[in-house]
Amino acid sequence: MSDFFNTPIKFLKGVGETKAKMLEKELEISTFRDLLYYFPFRHVDKSRFYKISELSGEMPFVQIAGRFVNFSIEGEGAKRRLHGIFSDGERLMECVWFSGIDRMKSAFQIGVDYVIFGKPVAYRSIYSISHPEVSVYDPSKPPVGFMGVYTVTETMRRRGYSSRLISTIVRNLLDNPRLAELPSLLPEEVKREYNLISLKEALIQMHTPTDAESLQKARERLKFEELFYLQMHILRFSRERGRKIRGLVFPIIGKYFNDYFYNCIPFNLTGAQKRVLKEIRNDMRTGRQMNRLLQGDVGSGKTMVGFMSMLMAIDNGYQGALMAPTEILATQHYETISEWGKQIGLRVELLTGSVRTKKRREIDDGLRNGDIHILVGTHALIEDNVVFKNLGLVVIDEQHRFGVAQRAKMWKKASIPPHVLVMTATPIPRTLAMTVYGDLDVSVIDELPPGRKPIETILRYDENRYEVNRLIQRELTAGRQIYIVYPLIQENEKLELKSVEEGVERIRGLFPDVEVCMVHGKMKPDEKECQMEKFVSGQARILVATTVIEVGVNVPNASVMVIENAERFGLSQLHQLRGRVGRGSDKSYCVLMTKMKIGADTKKRLTIMTETTDGFLISEADMKLRGPGDMEGTQQSGLAFALKIANLTSDGQILNIARDAAERILNAHPELVAGQPTQYDKKGEELHLSTESVAIILRELAYRFARKIDWSQIS
């Protein structure tokens, strides 16, 4: 890393000790490199001045030259605001400030020529700009052209720091003659092969673009760089895993698998289930550790595939484990799998945090001596005192809910790491799966068992509640059961959202002849289990709940899912909730309830749910709207892996090119793989680099991923 890159930000012109501390605390900018890579979140065109008469409808940010003719402060306390009347010499408009009022009033003078910049909004034919940028007009200086707009925190705003300040210090850095010392972060061979501009040019054009074309080239270069190193990081360790980590060999399909398949299976497997089982079978007899992701929509039969995969392990003298994220889901799996296992003489046990001490000792003994064939449980499975005699296969359900460190602990349960099958009912878009899971093998169950009827999804407003209640009554009269989901447990005055506790009373009043039960996350496990059992057994006909029932509840008789304040949920979560119905042979309904006044984007998002039940289409839409999620399992929305400029939703083409470059380099340079393997089965073309270029890659990988968990080795 160059000395220029590592220079503390306090030494930059216009910064100093005080600003440096603020930049580091609020924006994590402590070096010249940090500032150069703190990119604008958008660019605005300041190449011309507008007249107020030219403003119309929804316009982007504009700049207008003129003078303030009046200032006034209105309101008191939190509603206090500063109004400034601004004239371009022909017409008037308004500028409004809701914070920093006294400072703003003293900063501007009536009769001085200024340039204001911001987004104009019309109200009753009067245009106004909230918190405009204001600068003194200098007729000798032409408009600046394209300009970056930077994110600043609320704390920074209160202390007078603005996007314009960031822009000023960035320009000071770009004007520094030592910018020529910028290191080459991409090998020359890669830049040549993929026609990429230099780092210096990319950074200059990213912050202060000459024109739209130059900005686009800068974005492409910087996105490629970011995605190239992300892919290189994933692929080099996944290759190391394939070379170094041997797997258990399961050569036989024996009596347990055959007995269950030919004599006990309660329904015919779909073609997709058979295909996936064959893929898993091939994995587990190679001597290489299986790491396979199994995607399948709700009700597609993933649990059966997981169970039969564990039978392969048991037939070869090993134990199986299934880990689920919640006690409800773990219990559901246990009840299903123990019923299946009982038919062929298997011992299946359940381990959760609420298991009593005496039972816990029995389970520990059974695991250690091998009497237990399959252990189903929650996070309790990863505790150090849970010791298996011979763990051969770990099945992880709804794997995105487990952090990497949690999943890694399952590796240590055997001297040779067990095979791993991770399952999800949340379809993952290809670009995200390719990035999160690296070389993880992916299987998809893309067909539902015969006889399943599609779920009818309808969007209804609070004003339509009578119609929805009639649907509920009709289904109750027909003997079926109902889910009603709320976003909150208790009423919250600050949020205009419905809650479970108020909802359960309303529902009991509307349907007094049926038993209503309630489940939410703050209930004690025993209480929650008791309420769930009432619904599963059919004693309770309506279940009022929060999203704790998003996964793991299997009640074929339930035919209606009502989701209150549906606008508060992500599409993938709505899809999961919808999957709780439609599990029997009856026609089922999912009703998305929302208030009448919702934004156009929100309505569009909910309309997607009414138009398709295809989980992959929904996940693509959800990723575009909410972001791809944190790859280390600590966050499920927002930007992934601290990507500064690339977007996994929209930059799939660049991701593919960057991955191609990483694969070609690794094919040509096995020394880049950890452990320096002497042999590797090369895949495809090679891209040869100089010794200096290899050193650049290793140095940059060390910088970018020094503090990250090596999640690429863990499925």
Image (cartoon, rainbow, N blue to C red):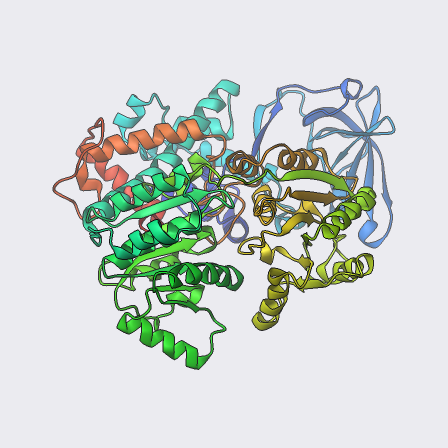
Instruction: State left or right for residue 130 relative to residue 634.
Output: right
| Viewer-nearest residue: 646 or 330 | 330
Q: Position of residue 322 (x, y in %)?
A: 39, 59
**Residue in the picture at 82% in, 60% down:** 509
Given residues 26 and 293, the one toward you in this image is 293
The single residue placed furthest to the front in the displayed view is: 263
Residue extending furthest bottom? 358
For residue 631, say whether it is visible.
Answer: no
189 sits left or right of 438 in the view: left
- The residue nearer to you, when weighing 53 against 312, is 312
Q: Is residue 475 above or below residue 328?
A: above
The residue sitting at the left extreme is 678
Q: Quadrant of the N terminus?
A: top left
Q: Position of residue 185 (x, y in %)?
A: 32, 35
Relative side of 130 to 263, left or right: right
Q: Considering depth in this image, is 349 or 36 the residue closer to the camera?
A: 349
Q: Is residue 395 visible?
A: yes
Q: Position of residue 310 (x, y in %)?
A: 33, 55
Q: How many marks?
A: 0
| Residue 103 picture location, percent across and down | 74, 46
In which quarter of the view is residue 198 placed? top left
Q: Residue at x 62, y 21 (%)?
A: 143
**Vertical placement of residue 97 versus 140, above or below:** below
